[in-house]
Structure formats: structure tokens, C-alpha cells
Amino acid sequence: MPQAAVPQTPVPHTPGHSHPTQQLAPQLTPYAAQAPYTPPTASAYGTGAFGQPTAAYATAPAPTLAPDGDAHATGSGVKVGAGKIVGIMVAAALVGGAAGLGGAAAGTSFFAQPQAVVTTTPGAVTVNNTDSVNQTTAIAAKVVPSVVTISATANSSGGTGSGVILTEDGYVVTNTHVVTLDGQTADAKLTVTASDGKVYAATIVGTDPTYDLAVIKLEDASGLTPISFGDSGALNVGDQTVAVGAPLGLSNTVTTGIVSALNRSIQIASSAAPEGDSTQQSPEDGQGDSPFQFDFGQGQQQSAPTSTISIAVIQTDAAINPGNSGGALVNSAGELIGINVAIASTGSSSSQAGSIGVGFSIPSDIVRRITDELIADGAATHGLLGASVMDAAVQEGATTAGAYISEVSAGGAAASAGLRKGDVVTSFNGVPIADATDLTAQVRAQAAGSKATIVYVRDGRTLSDEVTLGELTP
């Protein structure tokens, strides 16, 4: 990526170790001021650590669902919808581990050749000239103390990612794929390094593979600096963003950008995803091979995961790279608006997995709800619509984009709300629905039992109903 014209001493690039990452599934056709976070006392949505209902997720698009109670987008014709990105989507993921990692270990990578992992000594934000400090410097000084670097190891596997401090006594949010080495272990050894260089052991409090979020707890921690939550539902396209994390093991890295798009949803192939939460869309011709498979480096390949997750995201052009996973995306006030989770790549080669200015973060409104539940109960709930859906735009005679309902489960939420086969959902809780992935992501973002307003087209008429969501059972 272009750099400022400042004289520098080149740093030799040395081949290193593989880096675990995730990809979006072939059908990809695949983060109001808030007081410091405190552990919730109840798991009920909207009544946890923040003491008030969480706003509807107005910044991301959505879901799909099936007769068996799981969300499925069905059909063989998959076209690129408004909420989808053409190319490879890869999780911002873990960065490589120690020497000697096996090719089949969690050291997955999208780099054609394994890359060297650079480690640096953590420290405060450097300010050499206090007379010329800008807004980004101020944001970094506020946020960097709330972001940590996470090292996960299991047997001969390992990697690093990022995390965000929620409480003074050490609750930290990150991605599930960071602490499970992309689903390859449930008991990784976790070591967390704070921005000031202090190192902590940590344990997993709970993971949520459906939205790729996890909460860990640092041992014997006190006096940490919790992040301040912002309102992701109040964002505008063009708002300033700052990403903080540890790309390629470089802790306390700060990058800047803007909100590139809202109401976006992506589909990611994930080894950690519950089998029952797979969105099963058939890939278009030529999309079923290696371009959408995990690359383990060392010339060894593994078939792409069979499970996928659909998540609502904020799109940003702030540079996000492998190792930024679980790190913070903040606004101009230094408030958390998202947890970095994925990036897009332009081609099938694993060497093109670096930032191209298309990154994705899980909105803070969703993060807040799920982390409340993980801390209280060790698990999070997710909504279930009880219907199979497809992309409406690919249906014969289609006149509008949306999520086409191909089947309704008897007794499910959709049936109770009066939805029928052939209806096309165009809005969910005020969020535009462009395709099946959009609807799945929005339904999953809600807690089980949540009420939502759903707008749909039937026989040329636009109708609206309230639906009470069921509960996804992986």
C-alpha cells in the first residue's frame, strides 16, 4: 500500500510461517457514547451490562431460513446481489505461529508463500511533536490502551489475533476463529499482551460461532482500560473510521479510513460454524474450486469448510490485514463501532490476501448484545424465521430484489406472521433486504424471541407484519 514519502531503512522480508485465515464461501456470490462496559447480570437481550434496550441493527443486512429450523438459502442460480462482494472474502484472522507448525495445523493462510511474523514490543502511542498532534493521534491515544494482542496455541498449531477490553477486570471480546484457531481446537492456550507490554494468561468465557464472536477473561487483571461503545446504528457513509489491532503480529497498529458502506452482509466459510447454521447456496460455474478453499501454506491444501455463516457488517476502507481479527474499529470520538472480522481479496491467489481497502466489521450494537449473553451465560442466542429463502432476483419473472420465500415451516415464526411461499421480503426492521444472505444475517443478529417488523411483496402488493422470532438450535 502506498506510504508517505519519508526516508526509511528497508526491512528485509523473510519467509516465515503460515497464517490462519477464513474465506467467504464460494457463493459469495465469501465494527451514542457508552459508559465503560461492565459484566451483565442477566442474559436477556437489552437488559445486560448496558441497562437499556439495544437499538435495532440498522447498519447491516441479512438472513435466510429453512424448514428444519435453520437458515438456508436454496437454489442453484446465484447472482451477485447488492449486499455481496465479488472475489474472495477472507477473515482478518490469525497470524502465523512458531517455527515447526505442521501443514495441517491451524496455520491456515491465503499467502502463496508463508510470511515472516514480525513481533514488536508494545508501548504507548508515540508523539514526537506535541504542537502538531492531529485527531487520529488523539483517537489512537485513547483507543490503543483498550486493544490487546492475543496468542493462541494448541499442540503444534498457533497464531495471533486482536481483542478489545470490555471491563477493568479483564473481559475481552475477540473473534471465535481467533481463540479456536478457526475451529480446530476448543482448548487453545491463550496468552494476551496489553498495549503496555504486560502479559496475561486467559481463558475462554464463551464463543459464538454463528456471529464469529468470543469473550475471554484475563487472569489476575485489574485496572485495565475498557473501550467506550459507540452507536453503530447512527453511522453514515463517509464517517471517519480508525482500526486498531495487531496485523501480522505488529501490535498497536493504527490505520484510518471511512465508512464505505452500510447495510452490507457477507457469507463466510468457517470451520468453527455450527453445521446447522450453514447457508447452502450452490456456487456459480467455476466457483467451486481452490479460489474459495483454505490455503495451509507449504504447498498443502485442505478442502473448503462445508459450513458457512452469514453476518451483518460495516464496510470500511481502513486497512485491515491478517491479525486484525478481533480488533477495534472506532469512530471519530474513539468509540467502538465494530469488531474487525474479514477482508476481501481480488483474486484466487493466496498471495493477494492483504488489504485492498475492502474490510468488514461486526457492528457494535450486535457485539454488545452478544457479549452480554456470553458473559452472563457462556452462550448467545440467535433468531430463527422458520422459512427457506432464495435470492429473489434469480427467480423467473422477478420484478424486485429481496429474499424469496420458497418454503415456510409449519408452526414457525414466518408462518405465525402470515408469510407464504412466493412472498419476497424487502425489509427487516427497517434494513433493506437485497437477497437471501441479507435476511439470514439480520435474523441471526437478533436474539431469540425478538420482535421484528418485516416488509414483503405479495402479488404486486407491499405488505408489513410483525414477527416474533424463534430460536436457532445449532
Image (cartoon, rainbow, N blue to C red):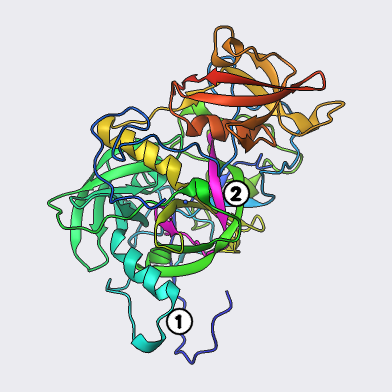
Residue at the farthest bottom position: 7
> In the picture, which quadrant includes the C terminus?
top left
| Residue 202 horizontal side relative to residue 44, left or right | left
Of residues 464 and 118, the one drawn nearer to the viewer in this rendering: 464
Q: Which residue is mark 1?
A: 12
Q: Nearer the viewer, mark 2 or mark 1?
A: 2
Foreground of the two, 293 or 378:
378
Residue at horizontal 33%, vertical 27%? 44
Task: Name the quadrant of the N terminus.
Answer: bottom right
Q: Secondary structure at mark 1?
A: loop
Q: Residues within 10 Å of mark 2 (few under 14, many from 20)?
A: many
What residue would you read off at disc 2?
262
The answer to whether residue 309 is magenta is yes
In the rendered structure, which segment of residues is drawn in magenta? 308-330
Task: Check disc 2 and report its element: helix, strand or loop.
Answer: strand
- Can residue 186 be seen? no
Tags 2 and 1 in contact by the CB under 8 Å rule? no
